[in-house]
Amino acid sequence: MAATSTEEASAYDRLLAKYKRVANIQNAAGLLSWDQQVIMPDEGTPARSQQMSTLSALSHELLTDDEFGDLLDEVEASDLSDEEADVVRELRRDYERAARVPSELVEQISAASSEAIPSWKEAKAEDDFSKFAPHLEKHVELKREYAEYIDPDRDAYEVLFEDYEPCLPLDQAEEILAEVREVLVPMIADIRESDVELAVDAFKGDYPADEQEELARDALSTLGYPWERGRLDTAPHPFSSGTQFDARVTTRYDESDPLGSLFSTIHEFGHALYTLGLPDEHYGTPLGESRNLSVHESQSRLWENHVGRSKSFWEHFMPTFSEHFPDIDATVEEAYEAANQVYEDNFIRVEADELTYHLHIVIRFELERALISGELDVEDVPEAWNDKYEEYLGIRPETDTEGCLQDIHWAYGNFGYFPTYSLGSIMAAQLFASASEDIDDLDEKIAAGEFADLREWLRENVHQRGRRYETNDLVKLATGDDFAADDFLDYVDAKYSALYNL
Amino acid sequence: MAATSTEEASAYDRLLAKYKRVANIQNAAGLLSWDQQVIMPDEGTPARSQQMSTLSALSHELLTDDEFGDLLDEVEASDLSDEEADVVRELRRDYERAARVPSELVEQISAASSEAIPSWKEAKAEDDFSKFAPHLEKHVELKREYAEYIDPDRDAYEVLFEDYEPCLPLDQAEEILAEVREVLVPMIADIRESDVELAVDAFKGDYPADEQEELARDALSTLGYPWERGRLDTAPHPFSSGTQFDARVTTRYDESDPLGSLFSTIHEFGHALYTLGLPDEHYGTPLGESRNLSVHESQSRLWENHVGRSKSFWEHFMPTFSEHFPDIDATVEEAYEAANQVYEDNFIRVEADELTYHLHIVIRFELERALISGELDVEDVPEAWNDKYEEYLGIRPETDTEGCLQDIHWAYGNFGYFPTYSLGSIMAAQLFASASEDIDDLDEKIAAGEFADLREWLRENVHQRGRRYETNDLVKLATGDDFAADDFLDYVDAKYSALYNL
């Protein structure tokens, strides 16, 4: 028995070593992508594309080669500790998703995206959905085929959703989103009828990008961003990426909207902090990797919404803000109101407030499900889109540019990605509610600029766990309950009732 | 015959496609290394090292796998055009050098470097050669073994030299360096006895790094650096790297030595310009890659010495310099003298002037040859080093810190690298002499800030040729003669006779 154990342990180690190579290639590709989005010279694209495509093909080949599959079989048949079994569950899932899809189809999807993206840009610029429609049609077909290869017996959208959120049942996600929609639609209607006037102009002014960058650096330092493992740069579409040893934040500066830039920075800080909290010693294995998009988004939204948009945060941060922009003399209450206003007639998801945001998501979720199932034809998307905006948000876009052409996701063939944004926000509320119970005087600590306890709570309860637990188990370990919308609904009810005197 | 041809062409294409993957991995690794040296956060090293080591192992595996070898055999046995035959010659050389050395030995050398480098740093800091000696001994042994695997029938140093300069006979290199030494030793002695006093203090002053950076950007723009395919950043040890689509320059700023920084920038510009001149359409194949270290150094030295240190350049550039540093009012003649002074008692290679530099190199070349052949024992290196400095340069280092411990190369086990620095300078003189014949009024053009003809001459005669020709053939195609020291010796004789009234 002892000899057998040793042999088995060694197969497990060999499997992990093989996976580490895949992870290293993917992390190298991540750096190449960061460079391309942030600092690469304009004409670097032809070489960079080839480098990325070689790395992507190699990581796919290494993950799906026979040796990887055989080692997996061997390891699964052996006695494993709980932790090892959890790791192997993750590797099996990665392997199956990669191995079942023929490389030709992956290349077809990639080629379809390369063609779709410029057409989408043109369609959006010219408000002409017909230029994008055939590409969307193609993506729908290819992605149905893709889902069929992975699992012909299940709903295709469910399979696609798992590319982004692999271990949360779609039924549960759907219930949560429906519950949120049912509460938010009437709440937003009430807010629109409220005659409370918030201090929406408290930050009106001119904010030079240089000074905003200094403000962003101060905000990151205040929240506890470890500069020895990170950087702040600008990018047209802010993102964060990297590993636990080097997780970088990007942001952008709108010279008339300092709050937008600041919240974007804090949002990306939340993502980076998650990455940085993954255990160093498990770098390159599932125990040292982040869970998935919903959990990642829970971390960014927790810092953006529950910290950054809180009154306590502004009690601490308003003096710092005023140091950088002495002309602004908003009170804490005014800052809080400006940061939490619900917009009357915004059609654009990425410019939405914290509340209406989720209806933008629900609309996309419902439409893309219907597209994949065949209930909705591509040609009917613009009208269906506008109808839903009218139904849920009481506004109707007048153009497709500010309607169904606004987001790039479908041009990449990404169906199932959108819901993770809302699921993350909802999870953030649940995690923050638990953290507030566990940490004495969390609100006072935030008001005093003390974020260490919150960082540590998240590190212990979420970050350090890597991909060890599936989503519900991770949420349950952290909060004591399955993932649900209750805390989120309590949070928005309390917050917006007070703000708008509902 | 036609069918056979098609089949052969297809094997050639498959071989190139395989090589392209290797090139893409190496270029990706190059970007990772650039990032690490220039902007990576301090604590990013553990993950970055693993990523680099995975990419390095993968490129080695892909280059040496049986399929690559079989394809090479097949392609070599087929009818090839001249160009194809040249490409295959390069691939065969790469393959043999990689395939003949066991991976274990490559790993041992890499591990030996990892141990040697901190010991070398300590030895240098504490002026204690004994701390580095055992590591140097180990490297000598491992590199002899390495050379033995590649070719047991040839002189080990010759084999090692080919890692850096694979297609110039060592005998020829040795003759050239000996000839240079024989002329330079007495010339430098004469200069030391000359009573001419150059304007060595013309640039004495205080030069803030920010303003030096603006100057460096102006210099690069003046010389014709295409910013849409490049960047300028700072790095502790300046270098340039990249591809024809994205070749980046780094430099550093010494606030008391603006010329040092400026020439370092121009030097790296020369390297980058070579890379940028490689044909776009051959990216990722030997026709789209640079020849080797000597040829690369010829490009950096041509711009640094023959352009940057010329009187004509200062006629054009002194007004730009004065714009940035209005307190300095050196004349063109004074600037020229300051840029070309021969130092009396400098022991440090990287701080050497254009002339004495080559004796620093000759000393290292002679010592490392003797080390590898066994004529010199490691323990005797410090004394042999100091003796040679006394013999060739008339100065004797008082410490090993400013003697045999000053350079990092041997701590990496790099034997055969040093001579390429001088060979490059000597080649620069030969290329510049030919360019001066081919381009009407080159000197006047430089004085007028017109560098397009020179860039184009280098592009056509050197850059666009990639690795198509071996070193001598490349030099002959560009200049009409084999690579030799004559033009270099004429150049230094004319320049320094005039400067020092010899």
Image (tube, coloured by chain):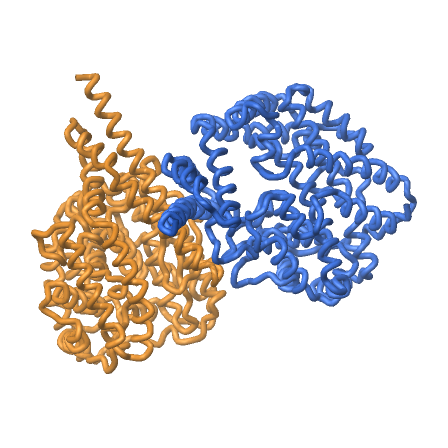
Chain colours: A blue, B orange
Image location of residue B421, percent across then percent down: 23, 60
Question: With respect to residue B68, does A322 lie above or below?
Answer: below
Which part of the image, by quadrant, shows the C terminus of chain B?
Answer: bottom left
Residue at image position (87%, 40%) is A192
Tell me which corner region of the image, top left, top right, bottom left or bottom right, holds residue B351.
bottom left
Tell me which corner region of the image, top left, top right, bottom left or bottom right, holds residue A170.
top right
Image location of residue A210, percent across then percent down: 62, 58
Foreground of the two, B423 or A161: A161
Residue at image position (18%, 49%) is B166
Residue B151 visible in the snapshot: yes
Foreground of the two, B495 or A147: A147
Foreground of the two, A203 or B492: A203
Using residue B299 as the reference point, say whether residue A278 is left or right of it. right
Direction front: furthest residue: A1
Direction top: furthest residue: B2
Residue at image position (59%, 29%) is A120
